[in-house]
Amino acid sequence: MYELDVNVTVNGRIFKRRIQPRLLLSDFIRHEIGLTGTHVGCESGVCGACTLLLDGLATRSCCTLAVQADGRIVETVESLGRLNNLSPLQRAFWEKHGLQCGYCTPGMLMLITELLRENPNPDRETIRLRLNDNICRCTGYEDIVSSVERAVELMGVERVVG
Amino acid sequence: MAEAGKVHSPPLGRQKERPDQRLSVIGTRMLRKEDPRFLVGRGRFVDDIALPNMAHAAVLRSPHAHARIKSIDTAAAQALPGVLAVITGEEAAKQTGPLPCFANPPVEQRCIALGKVRHVGEPVVLVVADTRYLAEDAIELINVEYEPLPAVSDMIDAINSIGDAVLHPERSKDNIAEHRTYMFGPVEYEFGRAAHVIKRHLRWARSGGQPLETCGAVASFDEGSGNFTIYVNSSMYNYIGFTIAAVLKVASHQVNLVPVDAGGSFGSKLFLHKIAVLSAVGARVAGRPVKYIEDRIDNITACDGHGSDRSYDVELALDANHRMTALRYRVVDDYGAYFQFGLGTHGNGFSQTVGPYKIRAVGAEIYAVFTNKCQQGACRGFGSEVTNFMIERVVDAAVEELRLDPIKFRRDNFIKPEEFPYQIPTGNLYDSGNYPAALDLALKMLDYDGWREKQQMARTQGRYVGIGVASCQEKGVFSATEFWMLNRAPGFALTSSPESASVKIDATGKAVISLHAPCWGNSPETVAAMVLAEQLTMDPADIRVTYSDTDHGLPGTGPGGSRYTVMVTGAVAGAARILKEKLKRVASHMLEAGSHDLEFRNGKVGVKGASGVEVSIAEVATQAHFFRLSLPDDPDLSSGLDASYTYDHPLATLPKSDSDFGIFYPIMGHMCHMPVVEVDAKTGQVSFLDYVAVHDCGTMINPMTVDGHVRGGTAQGIGTALLEQFQYDPNGQLLQTSLQDYLMPRIGNLPPQVRIGHVVTPSPYTEYGVKGAGEGGRMVAPPAVVSAIEDALGPLGVRIDTLPVTPARLRALIREAEARKNAVR
């Protein structure tokens, strides 16, 4: 089948691959590059588990072709903190029990990463409105809202101290 | 026959860890051990498994609800470059037997349909190819000739099906999978002398767990040994995993089932047989490891895990003092095309079929029917969530018809705190409870009287505000008897449902706990680490938790039936007791003190009353591992520091008869939910103004994770009440085959806050008094929410008998009610 060369920057590294035009970005990220933190839930853009940032915009990678990411910048959950150095957002999700099974979590983290870049001090209603984009089947969302509020707090402290 | 009432000489339990002791780790809101890996995107879900040379499978699904397979032309698919295997039902049947089934007589289900398809989505051909994309290309090239058969979509039609409409003619001449009648206590007598009989017809819609991760497996077949290795996001692999080997026609020790993190289950991954077998068959035929991950359509149409789908006619008998005396119901349950757990979901309901009330007699007539739909599996509550809905709906009906106070009526009928342990008419025991305390706490937290005033004000403004109440049970810790006790002939009448833990403390004093069932998104690592830390006064950071595959697994039944925390706690505490003995024996030599004079404190073993005379667990561990010659020549002091313990059900008895099932689900939790809703009568939209959820799950290991379960379960219950439904049209076509159509709650559908309260009534039978908490939210929210909506629309006289209460359904009810009113005028 016809193939194309793409050049995608993922979490700061450039990946050159020859791929079929039909390859989904979610599959490209998960199986071509091996970053399995991005999860696939519904394959129809409804649940948001596959959310990553494409040129800074929260994007459903299950409904995006990998070729559409050619020459663009992708950020996934793996770009956030590390195990022993969690980012404030990750730390906040841990502290406030913002996850249970962990499957929707990477998508949630990237969705909120976008929000907090736009607006470092969102109020509760703004957070709730944004969270309406993604589905979590475990938590009932309330602890996710608290997690985001806690992240705002932690990031505020980081800005002041840091 | 089991006489309902307080049990005066209750069974002796095996509780060793008393609930009233001082605890330092248990009861804290310790952050979860599971979280960091998920937060950095390094969970290990089944689709994250990649084996060298791995191929990929896809399934051709049946487009028909019911049809004979006349012929399958796979030539073009076989010829497509990159395709490794194209496997039809006939080919699969050469290599595999029927899938496991707990019903007796069983119902034959094949991993790939053989001769006939019985529901939309049923696998017809499995294709293995170099990539998933290619496998799906190949599927497009397969030509199947079907001869359509009459589709059965309606559960009442199913009762009367004949001829070609019968799904399993080799098993029965009709589509009645089972028809049983049970009488517990003097049902006829109580109805005969009742002052009031309240009747309702209720309809609980088919929904499903629908975790965000679908089911999947990665299998490899080793030609050198003849062994399979199967990674699968199933539970129960260390319980009934051997049945997978039987299906594959190999010995049980030739299949190693390897657990992975599951991206949610809610029951739907209780025991995944079809997925594991499909991937294994693919691997054996293709000669390469094979990954098969359901896509969302596969999962929705063929996951073998739809929830209950029931129609009830229920009657409640009351005496002149408005005391509930007896309950009887006729229920038709649409099980779909197969019958993997038999009537298990109704047996489950018998564990708490009187709710929290002193009902003396229960009669049940159950029709289980086959239709051309995905079969039922487990779904958070395993049928008891529907029993709760039935009870609370008929209780609310009594409130409405007899103009009673919903709070007082419930309270007057509660089993009293001093009446435990309490035997219900089915023979099951409620170990403990304090229902008035939960009700009182909920009333206080909600400011019930305040909301009643606000409701009155709202009504004067033409607003429809309603306050709901539901008081429900959460049965915890099933006994295996529930799998077969409703079978006519028991079949394989197993009675064990154990859980094991293995603990190893290495030479430096760090501990690894192996569990023998998977992580489902609950918190088994957190629970296990907290219990061991409590027992050994260790730092939980020094404890890691892993999950054994079947090669290394001890008996483990896994999460389900609100049992895992209770059972893991029992297993870890048991293993810790063995370890403590050994630690003390070694330390007694190091400290030259008697073993009985030693205690555990701050990660050390020390002499009681002598501060500073102590050795750390790490020092003892080094001694135990490496300095055998420093210890006495005692054969019981072999090197190393490890222990395994298998914890059996804390309290169960055998069924005595069809009118006394014995004790099979005794660790009884309780919930009282009070939602406040507002209904927009013009649009039928329901929104939440407040929500109070009081739960009693006994001693809480970790209140933070309990609250998480309460919130998540409540959200799911609200989904069940308002949104979720799998509907099949008259031709057996499923109308919701994506998450665009199958609506699950988003944050905007839910209360702004679920305010949680706890009443703690420890179990006298489990370690530390822990009870289950995983299912409670979904088991009480549906009747609570419906009660609130009905209360809101009280002025219009709207009655709600059918779920889900979608805006369209609610608008129809409001229109009917308004028409009735106008007609009266």
Image: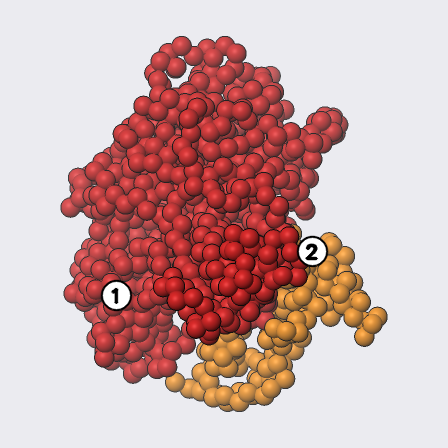
Is label 1 in a helix, a strand or a loop? helix
- To which residue does mark 2 refer? A146
Task: Work out which residue is located at the far right of the displayed protein and give it.
Answer: A160
Which amino acid, mark 1? His
- To which residue does mark 1 refer? B253
Which amino acid, mark 2? Ser
Pointer 1 indicates a residue of which chain?
A: B
Looking at the picture, how far across and down is residue B122, in whole percent?
A: 30, 57
Foreground of the two, B381 or B796: B381
Q: Say which residue appears at 38% left-offset and 74% top-offset.
A: B132
Q: Is residue A120 above or below residue B310?
A: below
Q: Specify whether residue B484 is in view.
A: yes
Task: Judge left or right: residue B685 versus residue B460.
Answer: left
Q: Specify whether residue B807 is in view.
A: no
How far is mark 1 from mark 2, CA to CA?
47 Å
Looking at the picture, how far across and down is residue B136, in whole percent?
A: 35, 72
Q: Is residue B331 above or below residue A149?
A: above
The hue used for chain A is orange
Q: Say which residue appears at 46% left-offset and 74% top-offset.
A: B626
Q: Quadrant of the N terminus of chain B?
A: top left
Looking at the picture, how far across and down is residue B437, in whole percent?
A: 61, 30
Q: Which chain is red?
A: B
